[in-house]
Image (cartoon, rainbow, N blue to C red):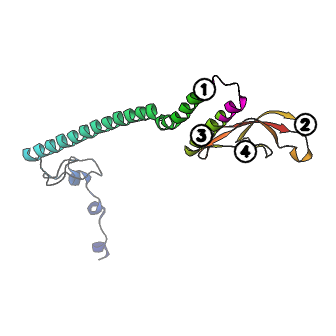
């Protein structure tokens, strides 16, 4: 009876040749109606879907070409606007300076025959004040450097001399050329002499 329960070696072995047919070991048998690799099951391409895809592709290509043309036009337009801006950037300042130029012409005309230095000096002072006021309205401001501490971001040291007093050691003794701000930006560094 024990022989009935024990499997026989002939029965337990798997016959690979009969199960796999003409397939290699480990391969699944092909189903006759299985879709090809890369195909979606149930999705058959019809001519109508092909025309729809072609139309969509043509539409996207047209949109892309239009967008590229718009971008080229934008680049051309902004380049032209920038060039025009550079050409006329100083126009506002020049218009503001024309009255000062007119004052110089009038002063030259009225003082050409005078020998009075006081009259010439007075006319120069009037024009200088008007010029300074006009430039200040446009954002120009002069630096006050003399007697202050040296700052390499604002000042350019020309030379060093012995300090005339102890409190001027390491500080600015003289200003050779004024420095200027335009708004918050330094447009010309002050040329200074340092005390040592």
Q: Main secondary structure of the magenta part?
A: helix
3 vs 2, front mark: 3
Q: Secondary structure at mark 1?
A: helix
Residue at label 4? 144
Find residue 129 and report its horizontal and vertical position in percent. Answer: 63, 40
Q: In terms of image quadrants, where is residue 106? A: top right
Categorize mark 1 by other alpha carbons within 10 Å: few (<14), some (14-19), many (20+): some
Residue at label 3? 130
Tell me which numbered mark, 3 or 2, is placed earlier along the sequence.
Answer: 3
- State the extent of the magenta-drawn residues as a range: 108-122
Residue 10 vertical placement versus 46 (above, below): below
Q: In terms of image quadrants, where is residue 65? A: top left
Residue lying farthest to the bottom in this orientation: 1
Q: What number is the disc on residue 161?
A: none
Find residue 190 and report its horizontal and vertical position in percent. Answer: 71, 37
Q: What number is the disc on residue 108?
A: 1
Q: Secondary structure at mark 2?
A: loop
Q: What number is the disc on residue 162?
A: 2
Tell me which numbered mark, 4 or 2, is placed earlier along the sequence.
Answer: 4
1 vs 2, front mark: 1
Structural distance between the alpha carbons of marks 1 and 3: 16 Å
Residue located at (32% from left, 35% from top)? 72
Q: If the image is split into quadrants, where does the C terminus sit? A: top right
Confirm whether the magenta stretch covers residue 112: yes
């Amino acid at each position: 009876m024990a022989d009935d329960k024990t499997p026989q070696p002939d029965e337990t072995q798997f016959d690979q040749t009969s199960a796999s047919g003409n397939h290699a070991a480990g391969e699944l048998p092909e189903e006759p109606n299985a879709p090809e690799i890369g195909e979606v099951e149930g999705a058959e391409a019809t001519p109508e879907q092909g025309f729809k895809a072609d139309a969509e592709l043509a539409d996207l290509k047209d949109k892309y070409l239009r967008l590229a043309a718009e971008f080229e036009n934008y680049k051309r337009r902004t380049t032209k606007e920038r060039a025009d801006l550079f050409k006329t950037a100083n126009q506002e300042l020049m218009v503001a300076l024309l009255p000062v130029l007119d004052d110089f012409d009038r002063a030259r005309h009225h003082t050409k025959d005078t020998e009075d230095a006081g009259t010439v000096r007075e006319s120069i002072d009037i024009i200088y004040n008007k010029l300074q006021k006009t430039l200040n309205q446009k954002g120009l401001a002069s630096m006050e450097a003399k007697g202050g501490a040296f700052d390499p971001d604002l000042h350019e040291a020309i030379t060093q001399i012995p300090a005339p007093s102890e409190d001027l050691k390491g500080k600015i003794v003289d200003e050779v050329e004024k420095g200027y701000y335009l708004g918050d930006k330094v447009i010309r560094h002050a040329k200074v002499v340092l005390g040592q």
